């Protein structure tokens, strides 16, 4: 056998060795099917139900084959006047996310650079407290200072949970940045704060974007705080959807159409920024 033939045989044997086994392929198919059933099918059913009449939603024979209608969406954006709720959710989400970043970015940087382990654990404890246990104290506190019913109470309550989430994401990201870069900037004449602003902060944009996107998604989807702390003119989308559930009946068509209307924007945002989210969440995973 010539040298070239032996090399070709070796490459072929390696390819055969790297080829996934049948058991691995079966496991992969089952895993993908499980993901589709658990995550994708409910969304498909939600979209299909939003295009059906109330009678067709109850008819199992018309699960996939039916005459589509936009009546439910006309009800949502016409009779229910959904656009003001979009505005309220956008205001609370954007403002709470922006203010949370103002506090979370320097806090995460300090905890990363000065190894403030105990402080980071205390921040994590604030994140894991069940939201329902905070509602009653917050309601009395905000009512005492006249903030119930306005945007301020919801923004502060969302920040209380967003800031710890951001801090924990950004600590891992700052840990991956070489401190030698800041030291070199300080040798060139920058102050420690200047080195942070001009060197570390621009390199942390993917992590900051990840934290901001996740905090905005949390705020957009939050129902409990908005239900208790919002007023008639500041209700957000999740609370507005609750209006379709009556005492004696449920408008399933309107409920599905409203759910699709608030889900599509957040899915579009997540897909558009998925590259930043993945890179930010995996930052520090390979540090060692």
Image (cartoon, rainbow, N blue to C red):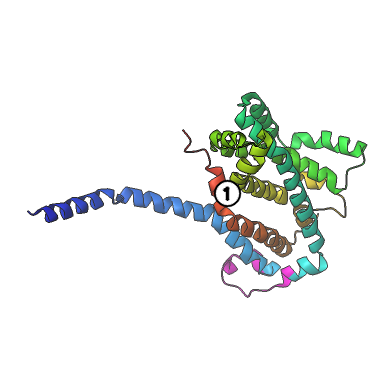
Q: Is residue 151 left or right of residue 170?
A: right
Residue 213 in the image: above or below residue 162: below
Q: Which residue is more in the foreground, 185 or 120?
A: 185
Q: Position of residue 107 (x, y in %)?
A: 69, 34
Q: Which residue is more in the foreground, 81 or 165?
A: 165
Q: Quadrant of residue 129?
A: top right
Residue 242 visible in the current orientation:
no
Question: Magenta span has 120?
Answer: no
**Residue of label 1:** 277
Q: Is residue 27 left or right of residue 134?
A: left
Q: Position of residue 243 (x, y in %)?
A: 80, 57
The extreme top residue here reads 118
Q: Secondary structure at mark 1?
A: helix
Q: Which residues are magenta?
A: 56-73
Which residue is painted at 76% across and 65% down in the image?
A: 76
The extreme left residue here reads 1
Q: Position of residue 236 (x, y in %)?
A: 79, 53
Residue 58 in the image: above or below residue 130: below
Q: Which residue is more in the foreground, 272 or 244?
A: 272
Residue 113 in the image: above or below residue 256: above
Which residue is painted at 34% across and 48% down in the image?
A: 24
Q: Quadrant of residue 12?
A: bottom left
Residue 199 visible in the current orientation:
yes
The extreme front residue here reads 188
Question: Magenta span has 57?
Answer: yes
Which residue is painted at 62% across and 34% down in the image?
A: 186
Mark 1, other Cα within 10 Å: few <14 / some 14–19 / many ≥20: many
Residue 2 in the image: above or below residue 229: below
Tally of marks:
1
Q: Is residue 80 left or right of residue 270?
A: right
């Amino acid at each position: 056998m010539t040298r070239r033939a032996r090399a070709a045989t070796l490459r072929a044997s390696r390819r055969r060795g790297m080829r996934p086994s049948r058991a691995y392929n079966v496991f992969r198919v089952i895993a993908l099917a499980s993901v589709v059933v658990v995550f994708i099918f409910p969304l498909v059913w939600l979209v299909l139900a939003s295009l059906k009449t109330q009678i067709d939603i109850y008819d199992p024979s018309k699960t996939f084959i039916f005459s589509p209608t936009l009546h439910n969406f006309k009800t949502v954006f016409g009779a229910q006047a959904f656009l003001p709720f979009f505005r309220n959710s956008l205001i609370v989400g954007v403002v709470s996310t922006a203010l949370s970043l103002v506090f979370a970015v320097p806090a995460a940087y300090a905890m990363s650079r000065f190894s403030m382990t105990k402080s980071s654990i205390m921040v994590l404890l604030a994140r894991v407290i069940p939201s329902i246990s905070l509602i009653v104290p917050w309601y009395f506190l905000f009512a005492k200072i006249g903030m119930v019913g306005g945007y301020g109470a919801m923004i502060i309550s969302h920040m209380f949970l967003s800031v710890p989430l951001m801090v924990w994401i950004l600590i891992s990201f700052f840990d991956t940045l070489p401190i030698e870069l800041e030291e070199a900037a300080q040798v060139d004449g920058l102050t420690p704060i200047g080195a942070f602003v001009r060197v570390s902060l621009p390199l942390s944009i993917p992590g900051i974007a990840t934290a901001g996107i996740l905090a905005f998604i949390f705020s957009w989807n939050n129902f409990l705080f908005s239900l208790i702390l919002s007023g008639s003119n500041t209700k957000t989308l999740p609370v507005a959807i609750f209006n379709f559930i009556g005492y004696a009946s449920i408008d399933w068509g309107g409920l599905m159409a409203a759910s699709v209307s608030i889900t599509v924007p957040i899915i579009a945002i997540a897909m558009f920024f998925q590259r930043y989210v993945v890179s930010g969440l995996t930052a520090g995973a390979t540090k060692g």
